[in-house]
Amino acid sequence: MPIRVLIADDHAVVRDGLSLVLGQLDGFEVVGEAATGDEAVRQAVLLKPDVILMDVQMPGLDGVVATRRITDLVPSVAVLMLSMYSDEAAAVGAMRAGARGYLLKGAGHADVAAALRAVVAGQAVFGQGVADVLLAQIGTAGPARGYPFPKLSEREREVLDLLVAGKRTNEVAAALFVSPKTVSNQLTSIYGKLGVVGRTEAILLAREHGLPFR
């Protein structure tokens, strides 16, 4: 089954270009387009695509607000933000709103395709320029005193630490000598205790509190 993509951007030339590129790649199907944030929300609810390529700046609802509404209404839909700028506030806001990735519009076609596949698979994706900005922000935070999430068990702390280090579920399982199903169950427990909705929010929250410790 191809990955069903909704393209949301206020510039027709950008929508047309992305649609043309994805249409030429195996494994993707562009199911709709939106020129405003409000339209992106409506299309997301109506079409229920696998993933939305969402511009940050659009008329009406901006991409961040639209993403928040979409993740509330159709949480199964992954959102990959696209922006002209590696703006720290926009990137953090997008992740908090529920986006699973943030790329700059200068990213190559192969990078966009790889990012789409990754966010649909539940991974968090940041373009290099965006990653540099976020890491710089994280680096300015002071170290946490003690472990910041006392509700987590020792094993859940190990899982979260590996998650923050960029490990996927299978890699976490291999590192801890448990099954991927066990790790998935532990992740569900971690998300509940942290009050987050998924992997991206858990990673951002953990990094804000100083994880991984150095």
Image (tube, rainbow, N blue to C red):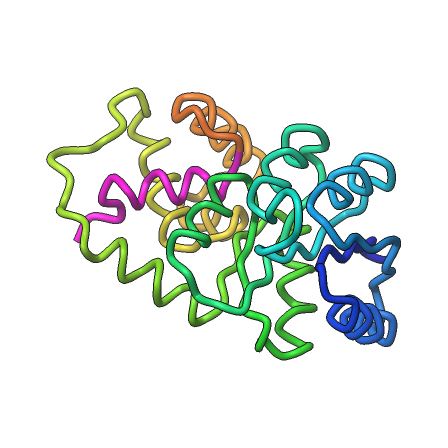
Looking at the image, residue 43 lies above or below residue 4: above
Q: How many marks?
A: 0
- Asked if residue 10 is positioned above or below residue 159 in the image, the reply reads below
From the viewer's perspective, is 116 left or right of 24? left
Which quadrant would residue 180 be assigned to in this image?
top right
| Quadrant placement of the N terminus | bottom right
In which quadrant of the rendered view does residue 83 lie?
A: bottom right
Report the front residue among 94 and 131: 94
Residue 135 higher or lower than 48, as above or below: below
Q: Residue 13 appears at what percent x and percent y?
A: 77, 73
Residue appearing at x 30%, y 46% in the figure? 207
Q: Within the image, what quadrant is residue 194 found in?
A: top left
Residue 67 location in percent, x, y? 62, 42
Residue pushed farthest front? 59
Q: x and y percent of residue 187 in the render?
A: 48, 33
Q: Is residue 156 left or right of residue 141?
A: right
Image vertical order of residue 120 relative to residue 15, above or below: above
Observer-nearest of 61 and 67: 61
Q: Residue at x 76, y 57 (%)?
A: 7
The residue positioned 48% from the left and 67% from the top of the image is 85
184 sits to left or right of 36 = left
Question: Which residues lie in the magenta part?
Answer: 198-214
Q: Residue at x 31, y 60 (%)?
A: 135
Inspect the magenta stretch and tell me whether residue 208 lies in it: yes
Residue 72 magenta-highlighted: no
Q: Position of residue 189 (x, y in %)?
A: 47, 24
Decide which of 165, 56 is in the foreground and name it.
56
Front residue of this view, candidates 7 and 120: 7
